[in-house]
Amino acid sequence: MPMTDKERGLGDAIDWSFAAGVGVRLTRSEPAMSRYTRDTVRDELFAAAARAEGPVREHTRLGDGSEPPPALVVDRPGWVRAAAASMADLTASPTSGPGGGRPWVGKPAGAQAGAMLAYLSSAVLGQYDPFSRTLLLVAPNVVAVERALRVPTSDFRLWVCLHEVTHRVQFAQAPWMADLMREAAAELATAVDEPVGEMAARLVSAVRDLRDPDGKPMSQRGVLGVVRALQSGPQRESFDRILALGTLLEGHADHVMDGVGPAVVPSVARIRRAFDSRRQRSTGPIHRLIRLVLGMDAKMAQYVHGKKFVDAVVARAGMDAFNTVWSRPEALPTLAEIDEPDAWIARVLN
């Protein structure tokens, strides 16, 4: 019996193998490096990832002492292939598996997804894939950023690894988060039987909120409002759940970077100043539009809001109490609690 729209996932709508091929062809050229530099970067990133594990575990008080697998150092095409495989795993429907059953639908969407991956491939420094349990470090992007910031290379590479290793430790402590992400993705991909008029009314209201009373664009806040307006109640709940989880994970990683950094990265203050300045630097209108559509500005906000939440809870309750957050899905903060850490403390710790 053929699947209904409600049973299909994004994996049935997007051909991720095709997306990987498109993304690889569209990746931007990488910074010029001699073979010696390329080999040195690879070796230093391997070593930095291994070196970061101990300080991260000690600071977070997470981990069982087991030896993690070595990091995988990749170029931009390598990241595109790995990211496409991860997305295929995340979005696969339980009945059809990755690569679903409608290739004539999946290839156009795959081409769009491939273009998105190609753009992101020059921006990502590292990534932990909770589905393959692989820590990826994108060597040419690390080199490009450290050259732009003019910071000590060995320090910067270790600093980047502190962030990505923290993500590996998070998922090792709470492997159920990967399943939660799959469930949320499945809900977001579910078709909804809803009168068009009701959806249109929500959309009009959300678009109206794109501008504040003075008529100035409200950028990411308004875009998120439009996204939520097009979703059903269950989809909005899943969207908020995954947004809150991402905010927690990124904020916790930034908290760990700042907590561990001074002890192991001599130039950490210089790196943090330069990197934060780079995050806030304005770009051309086309790049700003692309960043907005891909949610990259929202991700930047996740670092800020999430770190404030973690900083506040750790300061008030201690690291051991904060680590309750990794114990079960119900202990995760809601979007509202991210901005109200006392509410999370009252609900989960008291």
Image: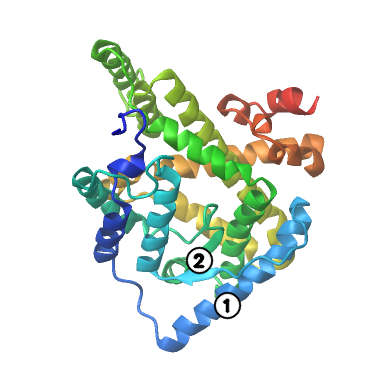
Q: Which residue is mark 1?
A: 44
In this view, the residue in front, 182 or 343, is 182
Q: Position of residue 57 (x, y in %)?
A: 74, 57
Alpha-carbon neighbours of circle 1 within 10 Å: few (<14), some, or many (≥20)?
some
Q: Amino acid at mark 1?
A: Glu
The label shown at residue 137 is: 2
Q: Identify the mark at residue 340; answer none if there is no mark.
A: none
Up the image or down, 331 lies above or below 144; here it is above
| In front of the other: 318 or 188 | 188
296 vs 12, left or right, is: right
Name the residue at 50% across, 35% down: 183
Q: Is residue 122 above or below residue 199?
A: below
The structure residue drawn at horizontal position 27% and vertical position 12%, both measured from the top left corner, is: 195
Q: Quadrant of the N terminus?
A: top left
Question: In which quadrant is the C terminus drawn?
Answer: top right
Q: Nearer the viewer, residue 89 or 148?
A: 89
Residue 153 in which image quadrant: bottom right
Q: How many marks?
A: 2
Q: Are marks 1 and 2 in contact (CB under 8 Å)?
A: no
Image position of 58 (left or right of 81): right
Q: Quadrant of residue 307?
A: top right
- Three-letter code for the amino acid on which mark 2 is drawn: Leu
In the image, taking residue 87 as reference, residue 196 lies left or right, namely left
Q: Where in the figure is residue 349, as x and y percent of width and height?
A: 78, 28
Please say if 38 is above or below 202: below
Assess disc 2: are there few (<14), some (14-19) or many (≥20) residues with their C-alpha within 10 Å of its C-alpha.
many
Question: Above or below — where is 89 with respect to 205?
Answer: below
Residue 70 seen anywhere in this rendered image of the structure: yes
